[in-house]
Amino acid sequence: MRLWGCIPLTLLALVALSTATQVAWNSDATIQSQTLVDVLSNDEDYTSLLSLLQKAKLIPTLNKLNGSTLFAPTNDAINRHDLWRSALEYPSLLKDNVQEELRQQLFYHLLNYSVTEDPKDLTTLRVLDTLHFPKFSLDSPANKPPPWMPIPESTLGNKSQRLRITSRDGVGWVGVDAFGQGGIEVKKQKVEAANGVVYGIAHVLDVPLHLGRVLSHEPSVSYFQKVLTPSMLNAINSTSELTLFIPVDSAWEALDPIERLYLESQFAADDLLRIFNMHAVVEKSVRWSDTFDSATTLTTEYGSELEVVVSEGKTTVSGATLSQPDIYASNGVLHLVSSLLVPPGALQLTPEKYLLALNCTSFISLIHSVNLTHLINDTETQYTILAPKDDVLSVFGNDGLPKQGSDELKRMLQYHFLPGKWTPKKLADGMLLESVLQEPGLGNGSQVIHVEVNDDEKQDAPSRHIRFGGAGIVGEHLVINNTVVYFISSPLEPPVDPLQTALPSLELSSFLAAVFSTSIAEDIKKTPRATFLIPHNAAFKRLGKLVSDHLLAASSKTDLERVIRHHIIDGIEYSQSLVNGSVRTFATLETSDLQLERLPNLSVIVSPSGGWAGMKSALYPTNMLTETGVIHELSDLMIPRSVELNVGKLMKAAKATTMINMVTKAGFDWILNGTAPPEGSEWADQGLGGASWTVLCPTDDAFKNDNLTQLLENIDVLRAIVSQHLIRTSSAGESGSFNVFDVLNNNRPLPLEDLGEYPTLLSPSSAYGDIVFRALDDKVSQYMVGIKNARGTDKQADWARVLTWGRATTGGGTGGVITIDRMLVPYHPPWWIEYFAPFFVGALGVGLIGLFFYAVRTVWKRDVTEATYEPIAPAAEEAKNSAIDNVKSFIAGGFGGVSAVLVGHPFDLTKTRLQTAAPGAYTGAIDVVRKTLARDGVTGLYRGMVPPLLGVTPIFAVSFWAYDASKNLILALTPNRTSEKLSTAELAAAGFLSAVPTTLITAPVERAKVLLQVQGQGGSGPQYKGVFDVMKHLYREGGIRSIFRGTGATIARDGPGSAVYFAAYEVTKKALTPAGASAGDLNLGAIMFAGGTAGVAMWSIAIPPDVLKSRIQSAPSGTYSGLFDCFRKTVARDGITALWKGLGPAMARAFPANAATFLGVEASRKFMDALIMSDSKKKYKSSSQPRTVSASEIARNLGNFETWSSHQCCEQVSLSDLPSEFQEDVDNLFGTTKRIPRSWLDRSFDCSPGFAKFIADASRTAPELFSVDQSASNELFEDVCVVFSAWKRLAQMRSSKEKWSEADFVANVYNVFRTSGIRESTFRVQCAISLPQPQDTFQNAFDVPRVLNTKTVIPDCAIFIPASRTRPLSHSAKSPYKLLKNHPAVVKAGNAAKRSSFRYQSTPCAQLPDMPGFEFASSFWEDKKPVHALLDDAYRQNRMSTTAAVRHLHSLGIHAPVTGLIWADGVVRAHVDWCEESGGKTVFMALQVTMSAPYCGPRDRPSNDVFHEWKLDRPSDILQVYFLVRNIDEWTIGKFSEYTVRGVNQMVEKLSSSEKTYKPWKRIGDLAPPLKTNALKENHNISVTTVVTSDASPSPPKPKSRRRRRRSSN
């Protein structure tokens, strides 16, 4: 083995000798030192390397180098390298004799200088220059040997390739990156030779490749590799001295996703090359990072400059961070930067490029074909592009689109571009956006496109649905700089001519057919800048068949063409200008105008220049775009003023030749022509010149069975027949006509529904001239017409079916023609039919009046007295009398109102017609009466009388009730007045207030009355059948608001009018009253005069607002916006004097009508008084039932209480009379000292603001409340906080200006701390207590039975021992309750039938407990209203409760006091009651005397006051009252409970031993009958006297019942 190992060294020595001849050797033949070859030869790890050096002809180079460094790969390293291992193993594969590729790789391991410092000792990264000079191609083989040193020519600016070396973890590494990472480990130690140093390395150093290969191996620039084009790659690999600044992947993510998508497409090659050139620098030398100064400027291949700044270890390139420098390559260097180095504006990404990337290549191709590329390459101008993608256009193919390059295609493509940046957030439904397309038909203006937006979505929601010109949006929109791109589902076609545009709409086919039937179709569809208003098909039907037949007739083409041109506006008006614009008048092609009315609900109403009265049509702004303008839709057809539709034309359209001849023969040809009657004719003398006419036109078939010759010969009969068919229709300007707008919806000459009644030309001379329409029940929109009230015929001559109709435009445009299937023959009824109805109605009216008075008499006989829980005779009598007075006032007011209507209605009708008629209709009031009588007879003066007749009773009743209520209100608001009589100003104020509630009835009644009064004036027929018909029509028209129209004007009239009315009435009555007499003594004549004077005074100021009210209530809806608008328009049109129209009739009516009012009121009142008096006398004579007074009445009446207390043996004593055994108990009850720790004064509590001051104030006024004891429970603190809360509420109520009731004080103050103070005992509210049996002796007086029969008293609060504590006394068989109940003496004392058994006696309550047993009450509380003048009656009523309690206790042998508290207006009083038995020879022998001692304060503080008063607005007092309540609670379950237990047990013992007898204490039954009889007689006399006296003089004020309302316990 050693021998084979030595052979190579021998061979190497020979090779060295032989190669010496190849180069000059200039050294002397001396002993040579060890060279690099020697070092390699001496080490077995380098044998493979020596072989490779020999093959590469590099041995001479190693020998000649002086001071070099060789990084020698070991044998193992070479074996792992494919190229080097192949060179050793397969010599035959050698390409040339010098192995140039191998030679260059070996040069990369060789340095021309020595690196003496061991790499493992390096502290910094070191860059080395190798002997490898890279080139694009290897040198071709030559016959001469290669140079021993490489020629310094390279693609790195003739610089050699670099190599980095560093130390890492104590190990040397060579070939590392710029951060010292990676590389090859220096495996063997340094070996120094005479001419250099050798470092053994573990792997072969890879020579840096060209930049293209380097980029492909760099993972952080994967996106750049993705977009790298072949041309860019070729430039990278073929350029020498190339310095690249390539952005990492994160830098490209900063671009918009669409921009990246474009760069990844096949169309971005040029832009990518520009981007590459912006990152490439080519200079004479490669710019490694160590060549950068602190500020270096580099010029890129694109021409832009890169600013390189090096500072503090950080390098930036034009603001981008140099993230990784110096990635070596054979033809340059690669630097990685953090962001793109594209100068602003340098990269022009046009919309075209994006569209190409987004699959819109076909769209772009079409644009190029018509030379519209400026639209997709302009980045400065804002555009919105509607682009179809390739898959959308592929559906249409070549045949579905215009030819490429054609003008038609150019026009279509221009329609896809919208100037402006229209993002979805800016779009709204119905918008019209201008496009680039400019249409000649629009005056070279821009064509618009319609936008539809689904408003169900939020405006900025990404899922919002948008359509442009009917094409939907596919996917999301794109915003690219100044361009917005929407991808549409189909290409857009520009609008075409208007007729072709409207043709697909079936709803418009009738109008289009009419257009095509004329000769103007071609002209109008080419008319530039035109807006078509096309009516729906239904418009021709609503137009009326006769009008439609006329327009579509061959002889009426001229009229039809005028109508068509009238529907074309000269100009373009989109929906925005029509709905929200300010222009109201628009010119049409017919040289006429259209008027627009914009309603508050955004509806638009169009009015033509002509047509019939008020002809209108609803506009539907549909914005159907055309190449010459736009199309909107209408609901109705519009007739211009140039088209005249007279009755003759309509009858001709109806083919009614016979009727035309009859009308002409009868002398009515002027009606056919729509002109005035000839001057001097009888028709002109009757004032028919300004009227319009509706002709009921029988068809020619209707005359088949008639002798026309005979008919035409008798001129009188002919005129009567024709007159029966002629209906005079009011002109448009006349008031009182039917609601025009309702009629125009179907364009009928007359409203045919709901039994419409109309007078004909025959009506003035015949009672049966009127005709009536009725809808057929079994048909839809079919009607019949007949002669009103015609009876007794065969029903063939007086009615006919309505066939068709048409409306005329002449004579004011309110007439027309209605064709019928039968001629109407004038009706002449038999005599029994003519006179039977009036006779029957009169008899029925008399019968109803008699029945009414019989019912009134029956009502008065009824007894209105009702039993109550606490019957009060004066209150019941007062309530009864009040009810009777209210009924009498109501009925008397009704009679007064009826009288006023009967007398004053003709005057009121005259006034109303004067106020509402058009100027010049009447010359004055007399003219109104004359024309009304001539037209309607006497009954015409009472037209519209039903509404006021129906309304007078409630109106007058409410008015006088409100007047009295207002007077009482004024008295209540002035409590300090010195006189009960109201001044004139106060009377006027009360009168004004009375008008407010009355208006709720007056306003709708006046509305109906006015409409009924004005109908028929001016020759118009009646529209309403009666008041209910009016109300129904008004409700249909506008609901409740329409019924109450004019309410403000009514208040403006009745408010001041009522003020003057009542004031004048009272003043006049006062002036007419003689001295010493009362107003009640005035006779009826004086009352009538006072009423008449009041009426005149009222109407003297009420006329102007009455004029405005009548006009507002009679005018069509929308005429006036309010009272002031009516005032302005009235004065502007008719002058200021118009406000006093109707003053004469009003003043003429005022006196008699109001005189009749009061005559009816007073006369009916006296009549009813007479009826009631007779019934009252009978009633009082038969009365035999006395009334028992209530406990509250006893307490309020001192005499009654004295009667009751004397028979109950009650005495009021002093507290000093309290028995000694009760002294300690009472002292403990009222002892409230030392309850609060004094430490509270030194602390601040967070209970509530003001609490500390509350405690301090209590300490200042009652220091005895506080104790030095520092201990206090949380419960006490919470209780005091509750008291503080009640105190604050009381303070708020005191400071308020409101009036507070007893219930308010109880709920807000008393119960706040009372309920919290009563914890263990039972607290009952409004518990009925049984009163005790009177003592045996009493006086036989009238009031005794009434007072002593009272059985119960109801205290506000009562404190009882809880049932749980009394249960042991009652439930067991041996309990005291059972023993007493079953004792013979007790059983004998009472029975259950008389409610005197022991179960009734064992409880003080009137209502028995659910379980039999004892109930004991310890305290009773009475709450009184703050306005109560005296508290004594509260004390008396509470004494009745405590008396019952102590009598109950005494009957059971219990000796204990009972307390009582009186609460009133924040003040509390107390008393203590107990029972004593009187003995000896006294009046009260063996009687139980109930003692009651008012509490006057503590014994150590003597006072002269009867009662001690705790004022709850004082902190100390309210705290003391609270502790008093707590004491009562504790005493009830403590000492008082002990008294009851001891007492009942002793009672059992004494009763068993017969030491004591049992005596029931409760009231048993009523008193003796003789006392009742006497009481009844006296009571009857008093009652009768009161009633009789009430007629002679005013009775004194009756006391109001103070019956207490029950309240719940909480």
Image (cartoon, helix red, strand yellow):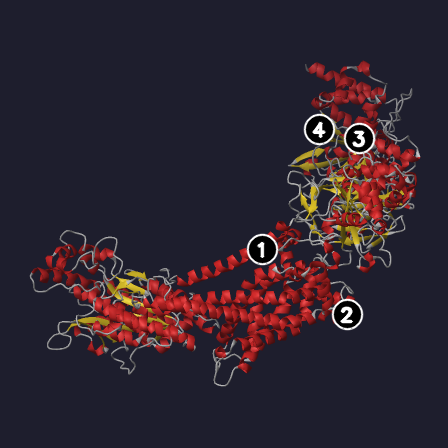
Q: Quadrant of residue 1201?
A: bottom left
Residue holding disc 2? 1135
Tag 2 and tag 3, C-beta contact below 8 Å: no
Q: CA distance from mark 2 to mark 3?
A: 72 Å
Q: Report if residue 960 is visible in the image.
A: yes
- 1473 left or right, relative to 121: left
Which-is-in-front pick, marks 4 and 3?
3
Figure check: 1253 above or below 431: below
In this rendered view, identify the residue nearer to me: 1495 or 93: 1495
Which-is-in-front pick, marks 1 and 3?
1
Which-is-in-front pick, marks 2 and 4?
2
Tag 2 and tag 4, C-beta contact below 8 Å: no
Q: Residues within 10 Å of mark 4 (few under 14, many from 20)?
A: many
Q: CA distance from mark 2 to mark 1?
A: 49 Å
Q: CA distance from mark 2 to mark 4?
A: 122 Å
Closer to the chain start, of discs 1 and 3, is 3
Q: Residues within 10 Å of mark 3 (few under 14, many from 20)?
A: some
Which-is-in-front pick, marks 2 and 3?
2
Closer to the chain start, of discs 2 and 3, is 3
Task: Determine whether the residue tagged by mark 2 lies in a helix, strand or loop.
Answer: loop
- Classify the position of the C terminus by image quarter: bottom left
Closer to the chain start, of discs 4 and 3, is 4
Task: Determine whether the residue tagged by mark 4 lies in a helix, strand or loop.
Answer: strand
Residue holding disc 1? 839
Task: Determine whether the residue tagged by mark 1 lies in a helix, strand or loop.
Answer: helix
Which-is-in-front pick, marks 2 and 1?
1
- Classify the position of the N terminus by image quarter: top right
Residue holding disc 3? 392
Residue 201 badge = 4
Q: CA distance from mark 1 to mark 3?
A: 88 Å
